[in-house]
Image (spheres, helix red, strand yellow):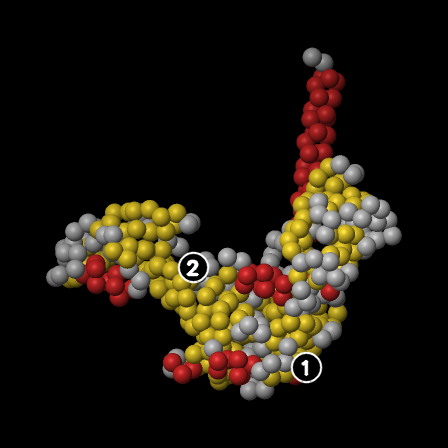
Amino acid sequence: MSRRIWYRRILYMVLIVGCIYTGFVIYSYIDRIIPDKIHIVVDEEEEFNFQLPIEAKIESDNAEVSFTNASNIPSNQITVNLNEAFSLKSKKTGNYQIQMKLFGFLPIKSIDVSVIEQTQVIPCGFPVGIYLETDGILVVGSAKVVDLHGTIMEPAYMVVKSGDYIKKINGETVNSKEEMIKKVKDSGGKEMILTIRRNEEEMNVKITPVETEPEEYKLGIWVRDDAQGIGTLTYLTAQGEFGGLGHGVSDVDTGMLLEACGGKLYEARILSIIKGEAGTPGGLSGVINYNEKAVLGEITKNTSQGIFGKASFELRNIVGSEAMDIGLRQEVKLGEAYVRCKIEGEMKDYKILITKIDNSSHNLNKGMEIKIVDEELLEKTNGIVQGMSGSPIIQNGKLIGAVTHVFVQDSTKGYGIFIENMLSSSEDK
């Protein structure tokens, strides 16, 4: 084989690999920009613009969803430039699908369309105490222990992992650290069988306690069975259901979303504000009233899009009844908006700017980038601080989302979640 032919084959291979890689990158970009699911209000024309410099054919598999576009012939399919706006409309609530095809035949995306009634909720914005109980006993990590003879041992090493949930010991259900400690103490040092849940799969593991003091035994496992803190309530529905935080409650050590079996909201009061600085997020420091009379609601779900549950009669009285339409993601615009929060005993709306909108479905609680520009709020907090997560974001008289994260290097900036993502998460089973 001549050197020229050999070089030519290598060039062809490089070109083929380059084309495949380029196609993969383009497809991944399109998949990220175009959402997996969109919401539209029944009987209302909703406009979308994905800002992609390509043409595509969009088809509806159901006659209930039609395209209101000049080229809308037939009504269930159009060819559009994805860098320009197009509209959808439906006369019937429900869940439907539309298909996007590149060049009219190459499928690139299937989008779920949820047609809903116009939704109103009551925006909140005040701090609440959050208490969550884990669904099982969370394993934080393993530890070394010293037995009666001075030998260093680590009985849980490679037996359990951070993020495991202990459900049973020797076949009996355990719900708290106290129950677990008692069973270990009563084991007499005999081998124990732990039933753990790991990545939604249950399994049994064996572990032998170490006698560290006469008749005192340890497994060398750091565990947690609850979590608590202060956050902000986002909204309350007419049916008395609440949503807050805009992100889930995660374990402080493992960083994993806590699998909760229940919890409560309590009254909370902010005592001081630690201002955010570059590299150090600030925070709201306060106290939680754990008195039974101070219970504001029952937490039923802890998801990556927020905490949700049922409000108490007291919470409904605190919130009142001043409802507001929600704004869907396609209604959110760059520019001026407001964040509602109760920082120093007074509920106020503070001016912000929405600087970026991400319509993809990959960062469900980071759909907006925001910047605090209100001088009063900047004077009080230097921007967004921990504890403000869940503060409602309002634009053009509609609740469009909630604050979720702060940029560590610039506390004036952060992320927000679309309100439709919170509402969808509250309804998912």
On the image, which quarter does residue 342 sit in? bottom right
Mark 2: give few (<14), some (14-19) or many (20+) Cα within 10 Å.
Answer: many
Note whether residue 322 is visible.
yes
Q: Which mark is residue 375?
A: 1
Q: Amino acid at mark 2?
A: Glu
Depth order, front residue of 426/93: 93
Q: Position of residue 339 (x, y in %)?
A: 65, 75
For the point 74% across and 18% down, which residue is it? 4
**Does residue 405 show up?**
no
Q: Nearer the viewer, residue 404 or 279?
A: 404
For marks 2 and 1, give the one nearer the viewer: 2
Query: Could you say where residue 146 lies in the image, as x and y percent from the top left?
Result: 21, 57
Q: Residue furthest left?
A: 214
Q: Secondary structure at mark 1?
A: helix
| Residue at (78, 39) in percent of width and height | 104
The residue that label 2 is drawn on is 259
